[in-house]
Image (cartoon, grey):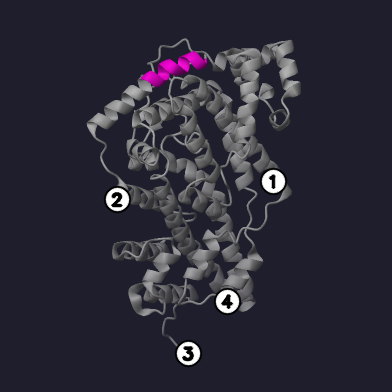
């Protein structure tokens, strides 16, 4: 009988992967870094290899979201520049004026905390909890599908080994996914100009994170326009304050938006047939194929009927929010000679999205687009013209009285109801609404 100790099969697999990661395998580490969406930078390649080696030793479950934050923060830091005191002073003054102008366009109350000027790195730190919340269902689906494919292809004889191999692959795959998400969020940090730029309240629900702008990105946005920078700063400040005020006023709105996103995300499934084909055809020396499959969305099958319904609700909600913000901002910035030109630039930018926003959409299968923005803005303008700003803003007091997708398509019936009388909540709903909107405590002004 052979008394020599025998390695467990999963130890053999781990040793094989570690040999590859030490540079003795067939795959070029630089190509693997490219597959993870990282630049061909020796420092980044070394970091990837280190993280994958750690993943092989990890016994934990799930994706290492701390790694995503580390990646995004590192990328944001490399592209950040310190804003000049004069630039910050101009933006602070812009927020002050914006608050005064906004008070003339809406009676929705001021914020409870002063707006902030933040760096790209700070934006990453503040928003990463939301990005990981959106990406987690997809990461889990990919890990489950990959493990299932491995086990199905192994057969009964290798079932024990493949169970352990599945855990190793979950850890490695989770590491690659986290690094890709970090790259996307790090790139987004160079594209967005404010906390509400994507349409959802990324900065969270705490008082100190209600409104913010990124001076470096505001300057970059204005540099591409033939418009005085002070007008750009004022317009963007008004828009950010309007967005933040709305979410503070309609306290149910953030939860409703995030619930719609979560409902959509949990319906995401991975195309295991496509994954099996990819596994069978994958050239080990060319991991770029795997990256292309992930970043093109090829592993995410067409949306189900339930997902399409959830996406339609989400797009309507985003359009209602941004359409209202557009109308209120237009009224508040009517003194700016170039406000219409800036508004059109913002609308086109939201309609197309930047490279990083598109990369996020393909990575997780979700686009945060207000596709009916112009229709929604036209509806809000008709309401304003018909019944005034106060009655318009009263539609945000409860989800039951917010305009619907049908109202966006044809606001005739809604306008008829509004001109006949202000929509009323029943006594119980009104009592709850009054309690939620109690502003009796002292609060600092936005300026």
Residue beneath disc 3: 1
Dot 1 crowding, Cα within 10 Å, few <14, some 14–19, many 20+? some
Q: What element carries label 1?
A: helix
Is 184 or 147 nearer to us in this picture?
184
80 vs 56: above or below: above
Q: How far apart are marks 4 and 3 (CA)?
A: 41 Å
Q: Could you tell me which residue is drawn at 52 percent across and 26 percent down?
A: 247
Q: In the displayed structure, does residue 181 sit left or right of residue 430?
A: left
Looking at the image, can residue 188 be seen? yes
CA–CA distance in space, label 3 to label 1: 63 Å
**Camera-nearest residue between 187 and 182:** 187
- x, y percentage for residue 6? 44, 81
Q: Which residue extends farthest bottom?
A: 1
- Span of residues in magenta: 97-106
Looking at the image, is mark 3 or mark 1 nearer the viewer?
A: 1
| Residue 226 point in image, percent of width and height | 39, 37
Using the numbered discs, state the Cα–Cα distance from disc 2 to disc 3 in whole angstroms: 60 Å
In the rendered view, tell whether residue 410 sits above or below residue 141.
Answer: above
* Label number found at residue 78: 2
Dot placed on the residue nearer the N-terminal end, 2 or 3: 3
């Amino acid at each position: 009988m052979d008394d020599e100790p025998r390695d467990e099969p999963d130890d053999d697999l781990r040793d094989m992967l570690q040999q590859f990661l030490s540079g003795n395998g067939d795959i070029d580490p630089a190509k693997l870094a490219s597959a993870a969406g990282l630049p061909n930078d020796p420092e980044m390649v070394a970091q990837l290899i280190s993280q994958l080696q750690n993943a092989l030793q990890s016994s934990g479950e799930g994706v290492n979201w701390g790694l995503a934050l580390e990646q995004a923060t590192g990328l944001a830091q490399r592209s950040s520049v310190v804003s000049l005191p004069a630039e910050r002073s101009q933006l602070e003054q812009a927020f002050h004026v914006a608050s005064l102008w906004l008070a003339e366009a809406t009676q929705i109350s001021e914020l409870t905390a002063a707006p902030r000027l933040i760096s790209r790195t700070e934006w990453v730190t503040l928003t990463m909890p939301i990005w990981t919340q959106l990406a987690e269902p997809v990461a889990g689906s990919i890990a489950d599908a990959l493990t299932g494919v491995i086990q199905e292809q192994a057969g009964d004889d290798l079932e024990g080994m493949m169970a352990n191999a599945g855990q190793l692959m979950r850890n490695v795959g989770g590491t690659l996914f986290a690094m890709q998400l970090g790259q996307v969020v790090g790139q987004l940090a160079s594209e967005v100009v404010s906390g509400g730029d994507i349409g959802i309240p990324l900065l969270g629900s705490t008082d100190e994170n209600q409104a913010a702008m990124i001076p470096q990105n505001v300057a970059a946005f204005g540099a591409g326009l033939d418009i005085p920078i002070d007008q750009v700063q004022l317009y963007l400040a008004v828009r950010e304050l309007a967005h933040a005020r709305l979410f503070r006023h309609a306290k149910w709105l953030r939860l409703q938006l995030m619930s719609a996103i979560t409902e959509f995300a949990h319906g995401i499934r991975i195309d295991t047939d496509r994954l099996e084909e990819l596994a069978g055809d994958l050239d080990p020396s060319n991991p770029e194929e795997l990256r292309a499959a992930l970043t093109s969305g090829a592993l995410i099958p067409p949306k189900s009927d339930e997902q399409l319904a959830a996406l339609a609700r989400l797009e309507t909600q985003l359009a209602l929010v941004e359409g209202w913000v557009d109308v209120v901002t237009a009224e508040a910035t009517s003194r700016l000679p170039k406000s219409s030109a800036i508004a059109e630039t913002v609308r086109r930018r939201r309609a197309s999205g930047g490279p990083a926003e598109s990369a996020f959409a393909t990575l997780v299968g979700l686009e945060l687009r207000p596709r009916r923005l112009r229709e929604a803005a036209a509806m809000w303008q008709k309401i304003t013209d018909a019944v005034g700003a106060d009655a318009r803003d009263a539609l945000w007091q409860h989800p039951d009285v917010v305009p619907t997708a049908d109202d966006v398509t044809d606001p005739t019936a809604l306008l008829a109801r509004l001109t006949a009388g202000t929509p009323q909540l029943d006594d119980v709903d009104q009592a709850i609404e009054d309690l939620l909107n109690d502003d009796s405590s002292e609060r600092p002004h936005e300026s």
